[in-house]
Amino acid sequence: MNREQVSRRKVLRGLGVSISLPLMDSLGSKSFAADVSPKSPKRMAFVYSPNGKNMQKWRPSSLGSDYQMSPTLEPLAHLKKDFQVLSGLDHRNATNGGDGAGDHARANATFLTGMRAKKTAGADIRLGVSVDQVAAMSIGKETKLSSLELSCDAARKSGKCDSGYSCAYQYNISWRDEKLPMAPEANPRVVFERLFGSGEKGNKEQRLKLAKQQKSILDFVLEDANKLHHKLGRNDQQKLDEYLTAVRDTERKVVRAEQFATKAPDMKMPEGIPGNYKDHIRLLYDLTALAFQTDTTRISTFMMAHDGSNRNFRDIGVPEGHHHLSHHGNNQKKLDKIAKIDRFYIDQFGYFLNKLKSMEDAEGKNVLDNSMIVYGCGIADGNSHRHHDLPLLLAGHGGGTLEPGRHLDFQGEVPLSNLYVAMLDKVGAKVSKLGDSTGKLPKV
């Protein structure tokens, strides 16, 4: 077996299509370590949920490994050993600092950068590099996509949004440099094409033509897949079958979303975006999981909604807008509805973690074992726009570098950026400082 054959086995190719494969024992070989590493890579993901939380129902009442699951986090009870609750971390650069109102824009802008956004609605925006892009510049070159940016909101890079802040701050959490946000993608079809398309213009046009004939993207790589299948061991044959089934299932969800969009003339939505918010979130989680499983990327950000979003949640019995409810004035009915929204988002996060945990990785581990996933918000209590003691989870085992299963309290006055410095260190993208960091967060 020559080097070219091993390389081809890692990627199935067809007409304008390339599908990366999960790691397989049959492909592992010390002779070809540069092409197919037997070790699993570490992945990083950052998930943003907006408008703060009902902190009384979010925060567990006890610390350590014996902590009692809080009402909001209850859907994750079966995953308790796969994540840790982090309390007492702050983002002081999200406070007004003399800049007045605009806490929602600052919450999004500061979340992954730790930097204070320049208050402007013009083209002279200024922020800083986000943690995901620091990692992308270091380890992103090892994958097809250096990073993946997702959102359920349409991207905005300009215009005036929250209290005189540019929309660029409020609709982007990933920043390549102090003036360049990495615009997230909301359309699952576009994401699917980025993950599995070859990027060749002519072939893309042919794929679109064939798509009208209801062909699957897998039809284009079927010949290559069949050749590979016969050369694999039995366990890897099963793994390949399961993976291709997952790709086809995800593709079908994308197609169904597109069909729904065309049949809903009263709903203004981009092609391919599900009309149901829960379906939209889960489809983007599905695509992230596939990207991680196949090592198409190791770095992802997902903003489920921008801070200040006034989306309603009628499907769970909350007809009022989220942002409106977040200014609860200690009204118990409003607080209870906020808790329902908080739990809705945690349900979806649990879906993502379960998905990663079900995906087999190398060394007898699963993809979640080799991941570090931050879930949180740049605001704690939405009524007071508090930016200290933020609601945060850190999921995954980081390839054995994390100690999940605990509730830790850092007692405040500790920058959230310290966590990011520690995470970067664990993936080999060492930095001395990020944003307002004062060092590397211990213990995690």
Image (cartoon, rainbow, N blue to C red):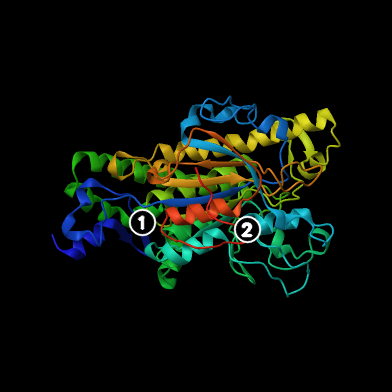
Circle 1: element type: strand
Is 128 drawn above or below residue 229 in the view shown? Answer: below
In-image side of 250 versus 113 (left or right): left
Residue 173's disc number: 2
Residue 236 image point, x, y percent: 24, 43
Query: Can residue 212 be seen by looking at this rendering?
Result: no
User: Which kind of residue does numbered mark 2 sit on?
Assistant: Ile
In-image side of 183 versus 242 (left or right): right
Work out how far the residue at label 1 is from the one at label 2, CA to CA, in angstroms.
Answer: 28 Å
Residue 258 image point, x, y percent: 57, 50
Of the two numbered discs 1 and 2 on the same chain, state the one appearing first in sequence: 1
Is 307 drawn above or below residue 396 in the view shown? Answer: below
Q: Nearer the viewer, residue 292 or 317?
A: 292
Q: Nearer the viewer, residue 399 or 325?
A: 399
Residue 187 image point, x, y percent: 58, 55
In-image side of 265 versus 22 (left or right): right
Residue 19's disc number: 1
Which quarter of the figure has residue 126?
Answer: bottom right
The N terminus lies in which quarter of the figure? bottom left
Residue 267 image point, x, y percent: 71, 49
